[in-house]
Amino acid sequence: MGQGIGAGAGRDAAQGIRERGRGVRLRKALVVAGTVAAVAVVPAAAVATTGSGVSGTVLAKGTSDGRLTIKPPKGDTDVVVRAITVVPGGSTGWHHHPGQLIAVVRSGTLTRTLDDCSVEETSAGEAFVEPSGAHHVHIGRNLGTEPVVLHVTYLLPKGAPLSVDEPAPACATAQEAPKG
C-alpha cells in the first residue's frame, strides 16, 4: 500500500516537474521574444535625436487650387525668397520671369492680368505658380483697400534677374485705349 501511494506521488511529482519545466520554457521563450522585439526597436531609437536650439516661423501659408506644376530651370538654379508688398492702387508693371515662381498671398487680393488679357484673382491664404518665359507676360495689381503682401519663391536660372520689364500686350492696350 505504501508503494502504491509512493508510486502515485512519484508520478504526480514528475508531472509537476514537467509542467514547471514547460512553464519555465514558456517564460524563457517570452523573455527571448521580448528581448528580440526590444533590440529591433533600440537601433531606431538610438539613431533618433531630439532637436534643440532650433525655431521656425511660418511666413505665409497658402492653398493652391491643385494645379501647381513646378519645372525648375535646367542647370544651376538660383532660389530666391522675397516678401513683396503692393500698396492699394499699386501694380508690378508688365513683366515676365526667367524662371518659375511660387507665390503665397499673405494678405489682400492680388489681381493678375495675363498676356491673353484673362484676369486671375488670388486672395489671402491662396497660392499660385507663375510660369517662366517671355511668352508669359503679366501684371499684378492691388485693386483693394489694404496692402497685398506676397511671399514668393523664385526658381531662376543661375544669374538671371527676378523679372524682366515688358510692354503691355496688344489686348491690354486695346482695353486701355480711350473710347470716343
Image (cartoon, rainbow, N blue to C red):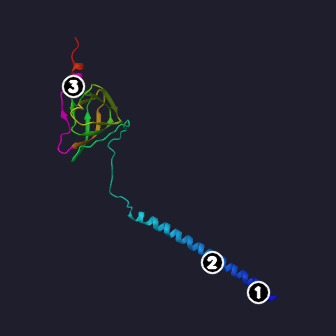
The answer to whether mark 2 and mark 1 are in CB contact below 8 A is no
Q: Quadrant of residue 43?
A: bottom left
How crowded is the residue under tag 1: few (<14 C-alpha within 10 Å), some, or many (20+)? Answer: few
Q: Where residue 80 sits in the image (x, y, percent)?
A: 24, 44
Residue drawn where x is 63% and y is 75% of the image: 22
Image location (x, y in percent) of residue 141? 26, 29
Dot placed on the residue nearer the N-terminal end, 2 or 1: 1
Q: Quadrant of residue 53?
A: bottom left
Which disc number belongs to residue 21?
Answer: 2
- Mark 1, residue position: 6
**As shown in the figure, which amino acid type bears the numbered disc 2?**
Gly
Amino acid under label 1?
Answer: Gly
| Neighbours of disc 3 within 10 Å: few (<14), some (14-19), many (20+) | some
17 or 122: nearer the viewer: 17
Q: Quadrant of the N terminus?
A: bottom right
Q: Mark 3 or mark 2: which comes first in sequence?
A: 2
Residue 144 in sight from this viewpoint: no
Q: Which residues are magenta?
A: 157-171
Q: Is residue 164 magenta?
A: yes
Number of callouts: 3
The spot of residue 40 in percent (x, y) is 46, 66
Work out whether 25 lies above or below 161: below
Helix, strand or loop at disc 3?
A: loop
Q: Which residue is mark 3?
A: 169
> Are the two marked residues, 3 and 1, in contact with CB atoms closer than 8 angstroms?
no
Three-letter code for the amino acid on which mark 3 is drawn: Pro
Characterize the magenta stretch by its predominant secondary structure.
loop
Residue 167 or 74: which is nearer the viewer? Answer: 74
Q: Is residue 118 left or right of residue 23?
A: left
